[in-house]
């Protein structure tokens, strides 16, 4: 069972639908804390640690059918349909879960399409694996060492959220993620369609979801709607959190 961070509302109608959030590659449920708390004013919001991330179990398998089954298990154990939001890797897992018949009322996919991509994240894994963890005593030291391989300070800061400095280990199963990289950047062959409402929310500065992807999306998700957040890239929820929250809220409460 996946690790879940549950945000409970002060006042929630009995019929309110829980919102489940699936993060992207190298992330964790903690990354979504601020947005999850804001969205939890009238409903329960559950931010997951996906397998091989955070405090969730590690597995050799890291393919989208396995990730989707993890999400379906969470939804089934909650005992009612859920609204599901997934970003990037989590968005692909959310799409497969929806297409596989998981109990999902509404689906939100953040800045990803049901297609394969060519941008491997293996260099990032190599950089994390190169860190001399036995000699790292602080996050600042880790950041300095990581800067030799990764120039972007924002990316380093994001990655280092998954470093347990005191235990000198990553909260990421880097071996499994590396072995599964082709599957992570790909998308499985899957039939069927999800006939409930779906929102594909993208950053206007991102090229992860392009116009040529829309026919594929509409074939799998006939009720898909599309929206863009201005001046946001792939990390739209971190770059424009208020706009992201507003878009999600409008869709879920429609």
Image (tube, rainbow, N blue to C red):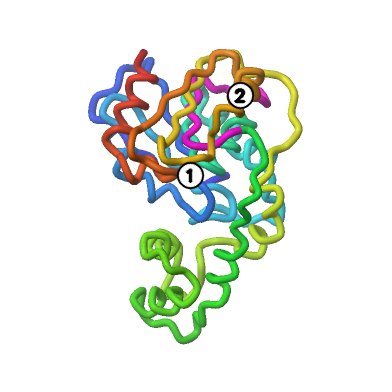
- Looking at the image, tell me whether mark 1 or mark 2 is earlier in sequence order: 1
- Residue at (63, 21) in percent of width and height: 215
Tag 1 and tag 2, C-beta contact below 8 Å: no
Depth-wise, is mark 1 or mark 2 nearer the camera? 2
Above/below status of 50 relative to 140: above
- What is the x, y in percent for residue 203? 41, 37
Residue 248 forms part of the magenta stretch: no
**Residue that protrudes farthest toward the bottom in the picture:** 135
- Please identify the quarter of the rendering in which residue 94 is found: top right
- What is the x, y in percent for residue 97? 62, 30
Which label sits on residue 23?
Answer: 1
Element under disc 1: loop
The residue nearer to you, when weighing 200 against 169, is 200
The span picked out in magenta is: 99-113
Which label sits on residue 157?
Answer: none
- Please identify the quarter of the rendering in which residue 195 is found: top right
């Amino acid at each position: 069972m996946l690790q879940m961070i549950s945000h409970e509302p002060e006042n929630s109608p009995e019929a309110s639908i829980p919102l489940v959030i699936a993060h992207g590659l190298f992330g964790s449920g903690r990354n979504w804390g601020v947005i999850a708390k804001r969205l939890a004013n009238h409903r329960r919001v559950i931010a997951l640690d996906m397998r091989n991330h955070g405090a969730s179990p590690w597995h050799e398998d890291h393919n989208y059918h396995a990730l989707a089954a993890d999400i379906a298990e969470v939804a089934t154990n909650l005992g009612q349909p859920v609204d599901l939001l997934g970003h990037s890797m989590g968005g692909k897992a959310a799409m497969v879960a929806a297409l596989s018949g998981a109990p999902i009322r509404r689906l939100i996919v953040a800045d990803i399409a049901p297609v394969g991509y060519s941008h491997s994240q293996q260099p990032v894994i190599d950089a994390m694996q190169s860190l001399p963890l036995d000699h790292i005593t602080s996050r600042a030291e880790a950041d300095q060492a990581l800067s030799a391989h990764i120039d972007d300070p924002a990316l380093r800061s994001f990655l280092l959220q998954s470093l347990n400095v005191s235990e000198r280990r990553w909260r990421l199963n880097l071996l499994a993620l590396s072995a599964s990289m082709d599957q992570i950047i790909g998308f499985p062959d899957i039939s069927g369609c999800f006939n409930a409402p779906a929102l594909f929310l993208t950053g206007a500065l991102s090229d992860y979801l392009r116009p040529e992807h829309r026919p594929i999306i509409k074939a799998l998700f006939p009720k898909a709607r599309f929206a863009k957040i201005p001046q946001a890239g792939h990390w739209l929820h971190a770059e424009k959190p208020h706009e992201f929250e507003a878009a999600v809220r409008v869709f879920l409460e429609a």
